[in-house]
Image: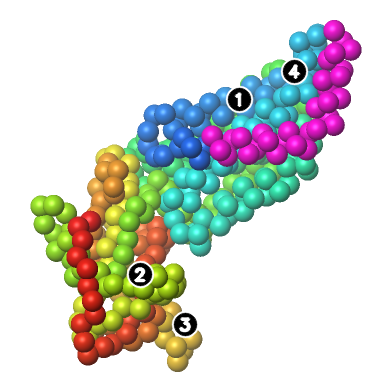
Amino acid sequence: MHERIYKIRDWVKQHERHLSSLALLSGFIVDALTLKRVDTLYENLVLIGYFVLIACGIVLLNLIEARRVTGLWALRISPWLPLLIQFAFGGLFSGFTVFYFKSGSIVSSWPFLLILVSLLVGNEMLKRQYARLVFQITFFFVALFFFTIFFIPVLINHMGAWAFILSGIVALGLISTFVYFLSHLVEERIRQNRKFICMAVASAYLFINVLYFTNLIPPIPLSLKDSGVYHSITRTEEGYVVKEEVQSGWGRLQLFENIHIKEGDPLYVYSAVFAPNNIRIAVVHHWRYFDSTMGKWISVSKIPYTIVGGTDRGHRGYTMKSNLAVGEWTVNIETERGQIIGRVTFEVVHDTTVPDLIEKVL
């Protein structure tokens, strides 16, 4: 029996690089296929299940490392515990990537995409780190903070800076409780690492706060469902009837699609923004124009309107501007704090004739 266990341990050690990649990839695939909305019970139970796996894995791993738990069963499971922790972290961070990517533009989502890429690329290094207590606790805290950032607003039906601050306090409270519980099981290991744990958690907390207050964290749990620029919009009982300029195949691939209008004619920007049930929040259409002579983007106007959460298709609305100058325009769909939910880009071209338009209902 012991010989077979040692063979399994040797096999795991020999193939740990591939197993690590498989663990992270498996977590990502599960999340990509199952996670849809941040405010549903199933999605949150999946994420909470990952947290339970991580907590149990950390506790068992440290009990075995401290020789508080011994025996044949401990020998059997010890090679698999770092992989279990890694799988759960992979599932959490890939789940966060799915949610945060949906919640903002790539410009505002890059820190979270970078975290996932770092996890996937650096899994060989991280595999060894999962056996270290300071690394375990720090990553656990980061995961808790990323979770509470969107779970607390869903819970209290409110978004904003104070909701984010409350999220951080909850995450700090949860990790402190976990470390306190762990200290009763492996007191010596916690005492030896307490200083480093506090420094690492504090650094992670400050770093995430910097990301938030510099608007690098997307405005989760909001997400953009649809957007576009149109020549006219009329609200009817069937929905929003819009007139859209016919674009060539190449035109649709361009970052700034050409929109032809007569000088002085208006353009309309439409957006459908999802928010969880019972959340009311102001959304802003921030119209900006690129001044080629100055070489920078100029803020033209910020037009707010209130959205109400709970609709799968998102709360629909639009803004309009006339007398648009020729050139490149962007309309950021953002929160009052300036967190970008999405962006509409187009280039205004003045023409004397009306372009071909198609009518559709949104």
Classify mark 4: residues with Cα within 10 Å, few (<14), some (14-19) or many (20+): some
Q: Provide the residue span drawn in magenta.
A: 1-30
Q: Secondary structure at mark 2?
A: strand
Q: Which mark is residue 296?
A: 3
Cα distance between the residues tagged 4 and 2: 54 Å
Cα distance between the residues tagged 2 and 1: 43 Å
First in sequence: mark 4 vs mark 1:
1
Residue 172 seen in the figure? no
Q: Secondary structure at mark 3?
A: strand
Classify 275 as above or below 347.
above
Name the residue tied to disc 4.
Answer: 77
- Kindly give the residue lying farthest to the front in the view shown: 249
Which residue does the image show at 45% across and 92% down from the upper left? 293
Name the residue tied to disc 2.
Answer: 331
Hey, what amino acid is under mark 2?
Answer: Val
Which residue does the image show at 51% across and 62% down from the upper left? 107
